Image (tube, grey):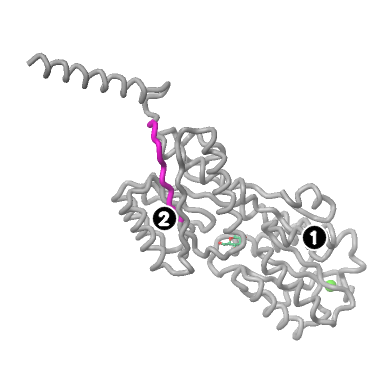
Amino acid sequence: MKKGKNLINMFSLILISTLIIGCNEDSNIKSKKEIKIGVTLYRQDDTFISTITKSLEEIAKENENNDRTKVILDFVDAKGSTINQGNQVDRFINQDYDVICVNLVDRTAASTIIDKSKSADIPIIFFNREPVEEDMSRWDKLYYVGAQAEQSARLQADIIVDEWISKKVLIDKNKDNKIQYVMLEGEPGHQDSLIRTEYCIKSITERGIELEKLADDSANWQSDQGITKMNQWIKEFGDNIEVVFSNNDEMALGAIHAINANNVFTQKPLVVGIDGIKEAMDSVKKGEMAGTVISDSKAQAKAIFDIAMALSTGHNIEEVEGIQDNKYIKVGHTKITSKNVDLYIDK
Ligand code: BGC
Ligand code: CA
């Protein structure tokens, strides 16, 4: 009898001390040893996406030292298949991950993934490929991290406008006071592709500069497709091309490759990209690319990480830096030309 009582006392002691340990300033904050974050990527070989994943890994590593929680990041590649991505999300759910991060293969088809996560009560952070608004409002534990697409387009336009104003004699090869251009678009239907294409041109015409579109087409964000498209356009329009707008750097680098391989230009067209990947920064430094716009992959990775940590440690999501409507973080851009490239290269 006495032994039993002692045992009970001991249990209550353990219980009380556990409560005390678990009880920091804010009683909502869970203290956890391990946080599991599953990340599914539309394509792991996408250069820009790989810069986000690299940054995420670095941030998690830094966090290891100054936090008592251990963060496990599990990256998987959907290889462009919605079926793969669905299976990957199923696995994260079955293995009871704390947060699921989804770089959607098809941004218009998020509902199945959302419904599954909702019934398992595991929050989702979408990134880089934005679900449509209707899907984003299906549940309150859905988040999106991406870039301010319109701003990137306007900065890209700025680069060309500045060049046009200062070097018009060189750029306006046919002296008609209009910019003859071709446009390399990203994947059809991708929000960054649609918005960048639209606002880049809008922003230039708003400033009273006339443009003439020679051609535009999708090269699916990829440099080899950029080369193919550009080669076709060079055959068709030759030296008439004055400017190449590209929705991202990979395709812009492809265009430059094609321009350098075809000996038809009296004056090479100006090429502008977006992303600020390393090869593009080098190309700006070399004077081959007129400029690019940094889409801050580190800041996007940090935003994903901050939301994931807040969600899995019970912190208030409103406290996350830069969050809007308790759902969205859209990171800003930096314009890069030969004038400031040295300040940003290798960073
Ligand atoms: C980037 C592209 C990338 C795409 C992937 C865009 O925001 O600019 O380089 O291929 O995202 O979804
Ligand atoms: Ca012209």
Q: Foreground: 321 or 314?
A: 314
Residue at the extreme front of the image, as rendered: 3
* CA neighbours of label 1 inside 10 A, class few (<14), some (14 to 19), many (20+): many
> On the rendered structure, is 237 left or right of 299?
right
* CA neighbours of label 2 inside 10 A, class few (<14), some (14 to 19), many (20+): few
In the figure, 205 relative to 25: above or below?
below
Residue identified by numbered label 1: 284
Question: Magenta: predominant secondary structure element?
Answer: strand
What amino acid is at disc 2?
Answer: Glu
Q: Position of residue 130 (x, y in %)?
A: 50, 56
Instruction: Identify the residue at horizontal 73%, vertical 81% (top origin).
Output: 231
Instruction: Identify the residue at horizontal 76%, vertical 71% (top origin).
Output: 256
Secondary element at tag 1:
helix
Residue identified by numbered label 2: 134
Q: Foreground: 261 or 177?
A: 261
Q: Position of residue 149 (x, y in %)?
A: 62, 55
Q: Position of residue 66 (x, y in %)?
A: 54, 33
Q: Marks 1 and 2, how far apart in space?
A: 40 Å
Q: Foreground: 282 or 239?
A: 282
> On the rendered structure, is 23 left or right of 300?
left
Instruction: Identify the residue at horizontal 74%, vertical 51% (top origin).
Output: 346
The mark nearer the N terminus, 1 or 2, is 2
Q: Quadrant of ligand 2?
A: bottom right
Magenta part of the chain? 30-39
